[in-house]
Each structure stands twice: as structure tokens, then as C-alpha cells.
Amino acid sequence: MNKTTIELNGLVFYAYHGALQAESELGQRFKVDVSLRLADGLDFKDDNTQVTVDYSRVYSTVESVFTESRFQLIERAAEAIASELLSQFKKIVEVRVRVDKPSVPVPCACDSFAVEVIQCR
């Protein structure tokens, strides 16, 4: 049986998410990774794009949800992305969304703070 995962990695968006007033005013760059597990049994031997999901539509959905709303929590941003992808693409059975916040308002030496959300049908 075919088990297929599609990944969109390293998507970078400028957005205004965060709990602090300065984050909502100044904004910052975020990195988003999305992993989609497709329904079992899809057959790709005919090399037909109708069998899978349209990667560009997935990207547009992620971009729209992430940049057109304001979230205090990156956890909520990841949930919103996952929910919208499951709603729009019926061939997806599981979505994993990771949101990296590189510019954290915490006095620490680190690459980023991140959250990962997994939602299933």
C-alpha cells in the first residue's frame, strides 16, 4: 500500500504575531514547515496531477492563513493552518505544521522558539 507524504519546508513569511504590543506593531519573519500525509491507496502510475493535491494551492492557503490574520500564539497560528488545509483538501488525512519564531522577545542565545501541531481527519 502506498503511503505518501508531501512536505513544504522553509516557507518564510513576514507577519505580526505575538503576545507583545511591539510584535504586533513591528512584525517579524517566521518560518513555517508543513507536512501532509495523503490518503492511503492513491495511485500515481498514470502521472496525473488530479491524483494528488496542488502544491501551489497548499502554499497559497498557508500564506493566506498566516499573513491575513493576527495571532498572539504561534500555537494558534499552526492550528489554524492545519485546520484550513484539512478543510480544503480532502485527500489529506494528516497535517503537521511547525512554526519557527526566530526573533523571540526573550533574553537568550537561541536560533528560535518553535511549535508543532499535528491534526488528523
Image: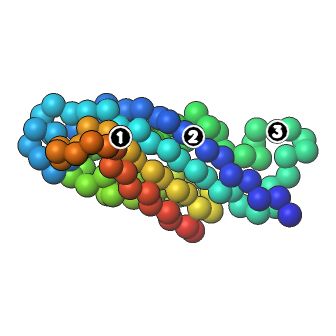
Q: Are marks 3 and 2 in contact (CB under 8 Å)?
A: no
Q: Residue at x 15, y 39 (%)?
A: 24
Q: Residue at x 65, y 57 (%)?
A: 37
Task: Residue 10 in the image: state x and y as whole percent.
Answer: 50, 36
| Residue at position x 62%, y 37% in the image | 55
Comparing labels 1 and 2, the label whose residue is closer to the camera = 1
Question: Residue beneath label 2, please?
Answer: 8
Quadrant showing the C terminus: bottom right
Mark number displayed over residue 24: none
Which residue is situated farthest in the left direction here?
21
Query: In the structure shown, which secondary structural element does the residue marked by tag 2 occupy?
Result: strand
Amino acid type of the residue tagged 3 in the rendering: Asn
Q: Residues within 10 Å of mark 2 (few under 14, many from 20)?
A: some
Specify the amino acid type for callout 2.
Answer: Leu
Relative to 46, is 103 on the left or the right? left
Q: How many marks?
A: 3
> Which quadrant does the N terminus fall into?
bottom right
Q: Residues within 10 Å of mark 3 (few under 14, many from 20)?
A: few
Which one is in front, 55 or 115? 115
Judging by the rendered image, the residue that carries numbered circle 1 is: 111
- Badge 1 marks a residue whose secondary structure is loop
Q: Identify the residue at the far right of this view.
A: 45
Q: Earlier in the sequence, mark 1 or mark 3?
A: 3
Whether residue 105 is visible to the viewer of this picture, yes or no, is yes
User: How far, Cα to Cα, is label 3 from label 2?
Assistant: 20 Å
Looking at marks 1 and 2 on the same chain, the residue that comes earlier in the sequence is marked by: 2
Q: Quadrant of residue 48?
A: top right
Question: Where does label 3 land, which residue?
Answer: 48
